Amino acid sequence: MEINEAVLSAILDAYPYEIVFVDRTHTVRYMNKTAKKRYEGRVFIGNSLFNCHNESTKPKIEAFLARADAGEDEMFEVYNGKTGEREFFTPVKDSSGTVIGYFERHEVPWDDEHPEVPIGDYWLRRRAGAK
């Protein structure tokens, strides 16, 4: 089997957490299936990340990029009290180690009442007002 763009996309779609890959110009370049469910109607491939994040987050993101350029890997950002998630800035590097973009990794809170619910469905239920 050849590992090509379609196979890599299928792998990322199988990953139960959202991945929104953003390039160095802060343009959304890729969203996996879970991200499309979670951010439906709010985040679009080809648009600026700042269409869904306000401009006040830009200095914070630029600071994370500078740290990534200096060699750091994934960095803790914040605990989101609204969603119960821990959020991490995750730089993506090419084979030479150059940072080509980033995504934000979310650790989703455990739902012990519904452990069988896939993460993508978890977000659909949250958007509908269910826990």
Image: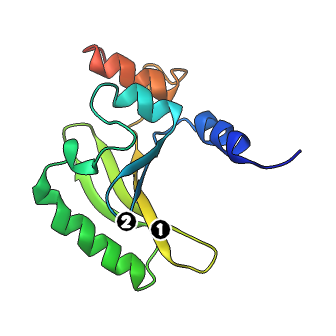
Q: Position of residue 115 (x, y in %)?
A: 51, 24
Observer-nearest of 23 and 107: 23
Name which quarter of the figure residue 127 lies in.
top left
**Circle 1 crowding by C-alpha within 10 Å: few under 14, some 14–19, many from 20:** some
The residue that appears at 67% across and 36% down in the rendered structure is: 10
**Residue 100: which numbered mark, if any?**
1
The quadrant where residue 75 appears: bottom left
Residue at the far bottom in the pictured view: 70
Expressed as whole percent of the image width and height from the top left, the position of residue 103 reads 41, 55
Q: Secondary structure at mark 2?
A: loop
**Residue of label 2:** 24
User: Which residue, as the protein is rendered here, is positioned at the far front?
Assistant: 46
Residue at (37% x, 58% y) in the render: 88
Q: Is residue 90 left or right of residue 80?
A: right
Name the foreground residue: 81 vs 22. 22
| Dots 2, 1 in contact, CB < 8 A | yes
Inspect the image, locate mark 1, and give the three-letter code of the amino acid beneath it.
Ile
In percent of width and height, residue 4 lies at 74, 48
Tell me the kind of residue under disc 2: Arg
Q: Residue at x 26, y 65 (%)?
A: 61
| Residue 26 shows in this picture | yes
